[in-house]
Every structure is written in structure tokens, then in C-alpha cells.
Image (cartoon, rainbow, N blue to C red):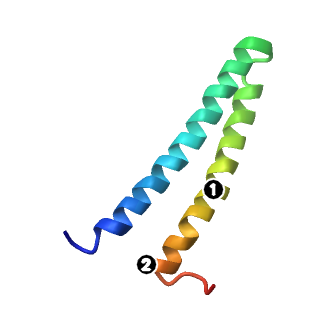
Amino acid sequence: MGSWVGPTAYLLGAGWFFATAIILGVVFGRWADSAWGPEPTFTLIGMVLGLAVALVGGFRMLLPFLRRFGNGPPE
């Protein structure tokens, strides 16, 4: 196997994390809308929270990747 397997697997995991965080935020928002309140409010809140979790968690996941495989910021 080539030297591309490690970085590819790392980035694939980060992509799944991004997608899962955003989708779960939207799903929980839709559930809260149907249970309690005004239709798009909790969906939008869930989407924003999911995006925030994805950005913060993704940054924390990708920082070691950049240090190891790329020209990331110094330690």
C-alpha cells in the first residue's frame, strides 16, 4: 500500500465527523420542533450547534493531521 492510505483514512474519519455532527444537530432540532414549538426555530438552532461542534471538533481532529502530514502550525 502507498503512503496515501494514512492521510486518506484520517481525512475520511474527519469527513464522517463533520457530516454526523451537522446531521445530528438537524435531526434533534426537527424532533424538538415537532415536540415543542415553532417549526423552524429548533431546526435552525440544531443546525448552528451541529455546525459549531463540527468546526471545533474538526479543527481539533485536523490539527495533529496537519502537523504530521502537512505544513501545519508549529507545536
**In this picture, residue 13 sits left or right of residue 8:** right
What type is the residue that disc 2 sits on? Phe
Q: Residue furthest top?
A: 35
Question: SS for tag 1?
Answer: helix
> Can you say whether 13 is above or below 66 in the image?
above
x, y percent for residue 58:
58, 58
Q: Looking at this view, is 6 or 16 the one in front?
A: 6
Tell me the quarter of the picture where residue 62 sits: bottom right
Tell me the quarter of the picture where residue 44 sits: top right
Residue drawn 37% across the image and 68% down it: 7
Which mark, residue 57?
Answer: 1
Q: Verify CB contact (< 8 Å) between mark 2 and mark 1.
A: no
**In this picture, residue 64 sits left or right of residue 51:** left
Residue drawn 49% across the image and 71% down it: 65
Residue drawn 56% across the image and 62% down it: 61
Residue drawn 43% across the image and 60% down it: 11
Q: Quadrant of the C terminus?
A: bottom right
**In this picture, residue 38 sits left or right of residue 63:** right
What type is the residue that disc 1 sits on? Gly
Q: Quick one: label 2 or label 1, which is nearer the N terminus? A: 1
Residue pointed to by mark 2: 69
